[in-house]
Image (cartoon, grey):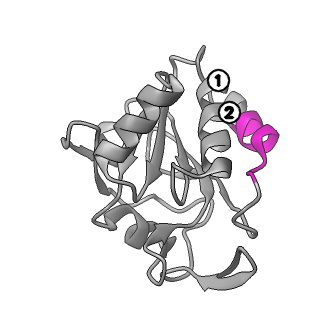
């Protein structure tokens, strides 16, 4: 899939997963370098917010926006995934006061390759948002075509609200 990144065309690792498919189990790292798998998050629906680099303006805005929106939703697991190191992510969370979600590092690209949103040439993930139900089925998927744009917060939050009714 071709996307726009600061005026350049970038290409994902393949054709990204779509609504209705089962999200493959993936392995990422938390801030303490512990392995986290999707299967360990499926005790409730999961909102996966993906950002290319947490230390950039739009990625920061996206992460803070979702952090605020899900603060009162204990019935979902909320994670943000990027290729930043766990240390970079922990430092960002501490500096920004973000506490309601879990930052996960895909520095080994397992998530990016399995979801097909890894951008090999830039070693980043495509900005995207996913909602996965407790069975691992993708209920919502948005891959932002212009990577400097924010995702559609209203649409993803609407999907989440429908799912947790």
Say which quadrant the N terminus sits in: bottom right
| Residue 82 on image: x %, y % | 45, 54
Toward the viewer: 165 or 27? 27
| Residue 3 screen position, x and y as percent | 69, 78
User: Which residue in the structure is indicated by mark 2?
Assistant: 65
In the image, which disc is placed on residue 112? none
Q: Which residues are magenta?
A: 150-159
Using a 10 Å C-alpha cutoff, classify the residue at mark 2 as few (fewer than 14 neighbours), some (14 to 19) or many (20 or more): few
Q: Is residue 37 left or right of residue 23?
A: left
Give the answer, above or below, for where 72 lies relative to 120. above
Residue 10 covered by magenta stretch: no
Q: Is residue 161 visible?
A: yes
What's the residue at 28%, 40% (across, down)? 30
The relative height of residue 14 versus residue 17 in the rendered view (above or below) is below
Query: What quarter of the picture does the C terminus occupy?
Result: top right
The percent coordinates of residue 139 (x first, y second) are 62, 49
* Residues at discs 2 and 1 in contact (Cβ within 8 Å): yes
Q: Which mark is residue 68?
A: 1
Q: Is residue 158 magenta?
A: yes
Whether 2 is drawn above or below 146: the answer is: below
């Amino acid at each position: 899939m071709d996307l726009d990144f600061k005026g350049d065309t970038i290409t994902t690792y393949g054709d990204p997963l779509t609504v209705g498919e089962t999200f493959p189990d993936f392995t990422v790292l938390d801030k303490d370098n512990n392995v986290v798998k999707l299967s360990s998050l499926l005790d409730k629906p999961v909102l996966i917010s993906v950002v290319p680099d947490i230390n950039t303006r739009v990625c920061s805005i996206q992460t803070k926006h979702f952090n605020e929106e899900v603060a009162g939703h204990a019935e979902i697991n909320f994670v943000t995934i990027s290729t930043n190191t766990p240390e970079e992510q922990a430092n960002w969370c501490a500096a920004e006061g973000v506490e309601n979600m879990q930052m996960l590092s895909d520095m080994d690209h397992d998530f990016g390759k399995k979801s097909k949103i890894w951008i090999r040439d830039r070693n980043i993930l495509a900005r995207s948002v996913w909602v996965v139900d407790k069975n691992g089925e993708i209920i919502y998927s948005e891959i932002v075509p212009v990577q400097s744009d924010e995702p559609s917060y209203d649409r993803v939050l609407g999907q989440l609200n429908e799912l947790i009714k």
